[in-house]
Image (cartoon, rainbow, N blue to C red):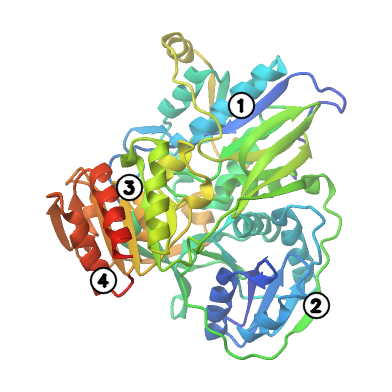
Amino acid sequence: MIPGWVRAKPIGNNVGMNIVVCVKQIPDPATPGSLDSATNALKRNGKLILDESDGYGVEMALQLVTTAGEGEVSLVSMAPNGEVSGMRTALAMGASKGVLVSDPALAGSDALTTARILAAAITKLGAIDLVIAGTESSDGYTGTVPEQMAELLGLASITFAKKVIVESGVLKVNRQTENGYDEVECPLPALITVTAGVVEPRYPSFKGIMAAKTKPIETVTASDLGVANVGWTGSSQKIVKVVQAEARQAGQIFEDDGESQGKIIAFLENLKVI
Amino acid sequence: MTINSIWVFAQASNGAPTSGSLELLTKARSLSPQVSAFVGADASAIVGTLGEYGATKVYSTGDLAGKLPGVAVSAAMKAVIDGGEMPSVIFFPQNYEGRDTMARLSVKLDRTVLTNNIDIADSADGVVVTTPIFGGNTLVNTAFTGESPFLVAFRPKSFVAEASGGAAPQVIVAPVGDLGSQGSATVIAVHLEESTGPKLDEANIVVSGGRGLGEAAKYSMIEELAKLLKGAPGASRAIVDAGWVPYSYQVGQTGKVVKPTVYIAVGISGATQHMVGMKGSKNIIAINKDKEAPIFGIADLGIVGDVHKVIPKLIEALKSRG
């Protein structure tokens, strides 16, 4: 556990909720991804947007704070180029403040380093009740960073939450499983990852967008956080080759003439599956 | 050769090892004669089968008593490693429990993780894994450069499970120990979704519906068609997120990976997220009203048309065949 961090309010103080949401700012998924030819890293140098899958976590956090009656939602994010536009979207939704870890040295960081950075950033936000993250990012989708953060922060965790409530300091989660869901409970503080669809993210209001422009975002570097060995140097993995996969050949395409069922049935008969 | 021994994080479902566990054991034994299965449960019912697929040793934590596997199994693994065992590589399935366990363990051991892989090799570059990106159009080979154990997660169906006829393995108890407050999350109830017919990831034919169905009620066409074809119904992420069908129906990067003989995509445009989960199908039929939809780029038979017209006629025609 990261030393010196008071991770929660004193026991028995169940008033209010202070929640940290980890948000990732990613290249717009609508534009095709590409790799940097020199480093083979995913190019992230264009305008970044809030990862759609993090909108659910921000919304969940805002609703839990509203239900608790007091508290606030803070954001942590890591981006190599000082980008804040995705964080502003989350602030416009209603989050209060953010910490951005931005440092050219961070480029090429692996998942464990990313988790170290974000965990250290969270400790800057003081006592917190809950950390929320998405289940995986929409660009890198390693899917381990939240659980690595929980381990680093010494927190219990419930991943893949599809329903979340808090009652008397106890987190009650319906956790997605392969064949249904489990009801899981855990005292706060804790970390959860939320699935897409857990809540419907609100659209920022005009007032929210205006207010977000002046909400504080503290920008720090890896060394400010005391995390060394980041980026390519701290990464114990190396891309050795990138190849194009064998492309699947397109077959025959027909405009429906009202008799397409015949073509489909003939196709299935030919394969002897009907 | 840099690989000595391999651990496989093995799981059970309904008293048998999961197909994913057997796939990973099959691959592991091709790389090393020393393959151990690590089971986050009482392993007694599945030990024999794990041996048949190549495990020479089975570590069993015993029943987890409602603890989530991520925190519990990683602690048990760490304890065995602290006790002197040092696997070269630990294989995890790319699923909920596999991901959580490898994430916790990576911090305990201070090791990087490589996830979403479809292959692994012990080569001149060291231990190298293969990861598909951009919807599988590009393959990235990545070598581990740090110290072992290397933590690797594989996508389902990356390997074909084959029994080796191995003997009953040695069983070793690997206790979880005291987890402190990190282990305070507890499962208090388990809910299983009812399903009939073949399982989505095992069916010979899969019929999936997407947003092109227009509304939740129209998903019944998909279920009816799947039933007529003795297949399984599936779905795109879009309609799972919209709440039309449960998550267990989802085919794609964050859902199931399917490789049926025939995959029928109904009203699915073919987002990268979806294609990753089904492009390994042997034959693909796509029906979509937009002729520019990416799904037609990989379809063997494509019908550009209104699914609300094509599918009811197809259902009628199949029924009349008897």
Q: What's the chain of the residue with tag 3?
A: B
Q: Are marks 3 and 1 in contact (CB under 8 Å)?
A: no
Q: What's the chain of the residue with tag 2?
A: B
Badge nearest the viewer, 2 or 3 = 3
Q: Are marks 1 and 2 in contact (CB under 8 Å)?
A: no
Q: Nearer the viewer, residue A98 or B316?
A: B316
Residue B82, image x, y percentages: 78, 68
Mark carried by residue A269: 4
Mark 2 neighbour density, 10 Å: few (under 14) some (14–19) many (20 or more): few
Q: What's the chain of the residue with tag 1?
A: A
Badge nearest the viewer, 3 or 1 = 3
Residue that carries the numbered disc 2 in the rendered image: B172
The answer to which quarter of the image holds residue B2 is bottom right
Tell me the CA gap for discs 1 and 4: 53 Å
Tell me the CA gap for discs 3 and 4: 29 Å
Residue B318, image x, y percentages: 30, 60
Q: Secondary structure at mark 4?
A: helix
Both labels 1 and 4 in a single chain: yes
Identify residue type, mark 1: Ala
In the displayed structure image, the side of residue B85 where residue A101 appears, left or right:
left
Q: Is residue B202 above or below residue A132?
A: below
Identify residue type, mark 2: Ile
Tell me the CA gap for discs 2 and 4: 51 Å
Mark carried by residue B271: 3
Tell me the CA gap for discs 1 and 2: 43 Å
Residue that carries the numbered disc 1 in the rendered image: A61
Q: Secondary structure at mark 1?
A: helix
